[in-house]
Amino acid sequence: MDAANYQDWIGRSETAEDIVTSAAVRALRATFDHEDVTVHEGDPLPPAWHWMFTNPIARQSQLGPEGHPERGTFFPPIELPRRMWAGSRLEFRAPLRVGERITRRSRIASIQPKTGSTGALVFVTVRHEITSGSGGCTIDEQNIVWREEAKGANPVSARREAPPGTSDFSRTVEPDPVMLFRFSALTFNGHRIHYDQPYVTQVEGYPGLVVHGPLVALFMLDLFTRHHPYAQIAGFEFSGKRPITLPTAMPAHCRREAGHYALWVEAEGAVASTGRLTLAGASKPEGAENP
């Protein structure tokens, strides 16, 4: 498809409903290794944990070779094979809550074919509005990119961005195949790069299983909330800089800056993902720790 034909897909929309179950929230808390996984009906859903809910559910016969639903229904039939979640911009206007029924309304906002150092690219921006009957509302604008097949043994970019300096606090996580499998299951993500070692190395050309972009983003949010459990987060945006593959250690960092908090995750000594977080208002003392 050329750029003109892609324009016909801009504005396409879909709607999905789900229930924020306590079991899923408890499971993600356990995946993040929290000691206390207790969850009660009515508890606010942590920021961005809506990624576990309202996900597309395609029949097995409707999946593409990489494990994602075939294109041509909501997403256009982009012929490039490799799909990555490049980043998101999120607004947390009012909390979604455990036990509520939520509705996701999604719309394709833009489609931009480009050419980069790795070849042809197609960037698709999707705006999601997730709401609940009690007034909860999260806006999630996602950037999804499709790329050409891997050229060479390792499609990870050779460009390396040095860490930006010291942080106020940090935490290192060592993801493993079990963690990636659990997160794939919780988000109903069938993308084989996260759990299928022969596929990810022999077909996509990565040296190991790829850590989910949203999982890396949630690690940044989890780092912040461990140190500021009472803060009211108003906005968060993240951008993936380079794929993270197993085995690896992932140091996550946070630093307070003028008007926001800067976050970043490193892998193999380079910046792999960056985040920017803003607060809604006054919170309890910033030094307070989770029990």
Image: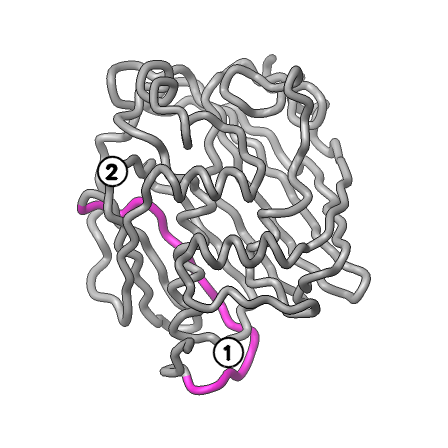
Q: CA distance from mark 1 to mark 2?
A: 34 Å
**Viewed as shown, does residue 232 lie left or right of 147?**
right
Question: Mark 1 highlights which residue?
Answer: 230
Quick one: SS at disc 1?
loop
Q: Which residues, given as a range, are shown in magenta?
A: 269-285
The image's colour scheme reads: one colour
Q: Amino acid at mark 1?
A: Tyr
Residue at 25% from the left image edge and 67% from the top image edge? 167
> With respect to residue 214, does 95 lie above or below?
below
Q: Residue at x 43, y 75 (%)?
A: 228
**Along the viewing direction, whichever of 261 and 213 lies nearer the viewer:** 213
Q: Specify the quadrant of the image occupied by residue 252.
A: bottom left
Residue 198: which quarter of the image? top left
Residue in view at x 55 percent, y 61 percent: 47
In the image, 245: left or right of 46? left
| Residue at image mark 2 | 247
